[in-house]
Amino acid sequence: MSEKQTTLVLIKPDGVRRGLVGQILARIETKGYLLDDIRMVQASEEQLATHYHELVNKPFYPGIVRYMTSGPLVALRVSGHRVIEGVRALSGATDPTTAAAGTIRGDYGYDTGSDAIENLIHSSDSPQSAEHELAVWF
Ligand code: TYD
């Protein structure tokens, strides 16, 4: 049965700053997923509070806001069969120091020692999150 899905991907400000937009996008496209929409955004605190509504009370949340507003990010709408699971697999584990080699975070990310984990990419973790998050950025 078809499980065609749509997901939200953010190439975070460190990815833009380091010139990795093309390489990160290439991994997603090369895997076979379809880029449906793309935009560069300077995130507002309101957008971040909606996007990260489950994290706003965490001690590291102010660090996330500093990180995610430190420059523009690139939002992608990506679709494909099982794309949510697939882009999460391409992205790798949250901590780039231990993310597996071969993943985006494992290959390009490093721990800068800042308050928030800088890990280059966000991708939705469920169809419900994707719907919620796509509405924030598109
Ligand atoms: P989370 O949804 O747990 O991870 P993922 O991005 O892998 O789905 O957390 C969202 C972001 O919050 C994560 O990418 C980086 C940041 N974060 C921290 O800065 N410190 C932390 O201790 C955690 C758990 C997350």
Image (cartoon, rainbow, N blue to C red):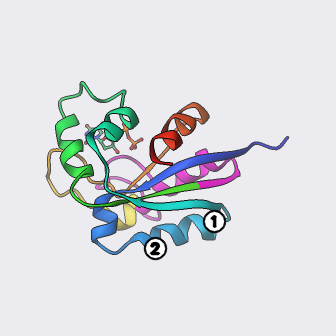
Which quadrant of the figure shows ligand 1?
top left
Please state if 88 lies on the left or on the right of 127 as rendered: left
The location of residue 14, given as percent across then percent down, is 28, 62
Between 96 and 32, the residue placed more toward the observer is 32
Instruction: Specify few, some or many for label 1: CA neighbours under 10 Å numbering under 14, 14-19, or 20 or more.
Output: few
- Classify 24 as above or below 43: below
Say what secondary structure mark 1 lies in: helix
Three-letter residue code for mark 2: Gln
Category of crowding for the residue at label 2, using alpha-carbon neighbours closer than 10 angstroms: few (below 14), some (14–19), many (at least 20): few
Q: Which residue is at 31% across, 50% downward? A: 43
Image spot of residue 32 (x, y percent): 68, 65
Which residue position is annotated with label 2?
A: 23
Magenta-colored stretch includes residue 95: yes
Q: Quadrant of the N terminus?
A: top right
Mark 2 vs mark 1, CA separation in Å: 12 Å
Q: Which residues are magenta?
A: 78-104
**Residue type for callout 1:** Lys
Residue drawn at point x = 43 percent, y = 54 percent = 10
| Residue under label 1 | 31
Q: What is the secondary structure assignment of the residue under circle 2?
A: helix
Residue 110, image x and y in percent? 26, 61
Which of the pair 9/87 is nearer the observer? Answer: 9
**In terms of sequence position, does the residue under pointer 2 or pointer 1 come before the other?**
2
